[in-house]
Amino acid sequence: MNPWHNISLWMDQLDDPLQARPSLQAHLHADVAIIGAGYTGLWTAYYLKRQAPQLRVVMVEAETAGFGASGRNGGWLMGNLLGEDRLLAGVPALERKAGFDLLHGIPDEVASVVARESIDCDLRKGGVLYCAARYPEQEVRLREYLKELRALGLSEDDYRWLAPSELATQLRVANTYGALYSPHCATIQPAKLVRGLARCVEGLGVELYECSPVIDWQPGLVRTAQGLVTADWVVPAIEGYAASLPPLGNHQLPVQSLIVATEPLPADVWAGIGLERGQAFSEFSRQVTYGQRSLDDRLIFGARGGYRFGGRLRSDFNLTDDELGLRRYLMGEIFPQLRNVRFTHSWGGNLGMARRFQPHMLRDTRNRIALSGGYGGEGVGASNLGGRTLADLILGQDSELLRQPWVLSDSPISSLRRWEPEPCRWLGYNAIIRSFVHEDEVLANPRSPAWRRRLAQAVAARMESLMG
């Protein structure tokens, strides 16, 4: 059996033998060496070769393209960047609008590329529904969030409040108080996108070596067990695997997100749920749930996972009974008709979380390193923006991409905020997650007294602020 099957529903659906490309067995010199054949590395390679086809770009991948988060995510292609509201709040109004326009254009940019390159990845731009779907406090928080968005200059065209009756025309949930709808999101089959991008960049002349884990890297040099690449620029595009290549793990925390997929559901069940246009949806709790209707009529549903002591990567994504149970419970609260539905697939992946929830796109000019990451679970779209930005940084272009507050045009990696040392980060992260779980349990129980509900919210909000 091919070891790269069974890592997600998405990879299992591929009409692709997943035969690994040859590993690096030589000493090469490149203009740009990219570590990792996930979205960030592939988008960077794509935009570099589109703008400067003469460049020699060499990519080395530890497994095969799409093995990491790019082939394991929930399939949301968002026109957003984690922490965008905080980052853009401090810039003048015209620059803020330009920044939001850039972000909101991400799904359309990806759509134009996949159309141009004939990459079929089931892309549907149906928008996203953030639902107050289980208890009244979600509506309060969601309306407060809408006020914050309006204060930033975002209009009804960007985020619109839906009353329960209007939400029901798109999505029907058991106990809704309303929702926010944004058109700036698409859903995709993510493994089709990453595998298609890999074939595309090879066609542009990029050299891609698989089964070639990097054992050492430094400015101008990338070393594998049997090969070596020297390069004018190095791009460590490894996101959730940063802990495996010091010193990147000081700045990107590997956390997990875990997903289940139902069996294909019959038409009468979908008639009671909706999502006819490929919309993404979430219920507005700190558990960070997310879902979509796949093109073959499965419900894909995920929620926040965990963090392992010392930043250890998780490699076994056979979900435990508790992990499956939490996702079944949350799904059943939103869609009672699915409480006993059969799950055909469950999986997860490692993603990168930057300190203060602040993604970065960085050029270290002195050491000639370009880095993009810390997407915090929003990397399907953010990686496209990151790849475009790194290409412009490496090529020395002057563009709107480089005038954004998340871009560090001439900064060493050491300038990024560091995560606290162990055991502080493990204790802190798990205390925060426990406060979120407790809040959810209290608020989801209609018998919880008002004082307890207020206390659970206050504690969770305070703990959440420590992460920002």
Image (cartoon, rainbow, N blue to C red):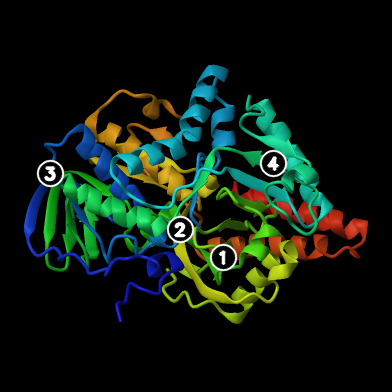
Query: Does residue 157 appear anywhere in the picture?
Result: yes
Residue situated in front as seen by the camera: 423 or 337: 337
Front of the two marks 4 and 1:
4
Confirm whether residue 412 shows in the render: no
Task: State which tag comes first along the sequence, 4 or 2.
Answer: 4
Residue at mark 4 to residue at mark 2: CA–CA distance: 26 Å
Residue picked out by circle 4 = 180
What numbered label is drawn on residue 351? 2
Quadrant of the rendered structure where residue 9 is? Answer: bottom left
Residue 341 in the image: state x and y as whole percent.
Answer: 64, 74
Where does label 1 land, which residue? 305
Q: Closer to the N terminus: mark 1 or mark 2?
A: 1
How far apart marks 1 and 2 lie (CA) works out to 10 Å
Tag 4 near tag 1, CB within 8 Å:
no
Q: Amino acid at mark 4?
A: Leu
| Mark 1 residue type | Gly
Residue type beneath disc 3:
Arg
Q: Callout 3: helix, strand or loop?
A: loop
**Which of the labelled discs sits on residue 56, or is there none?**
3
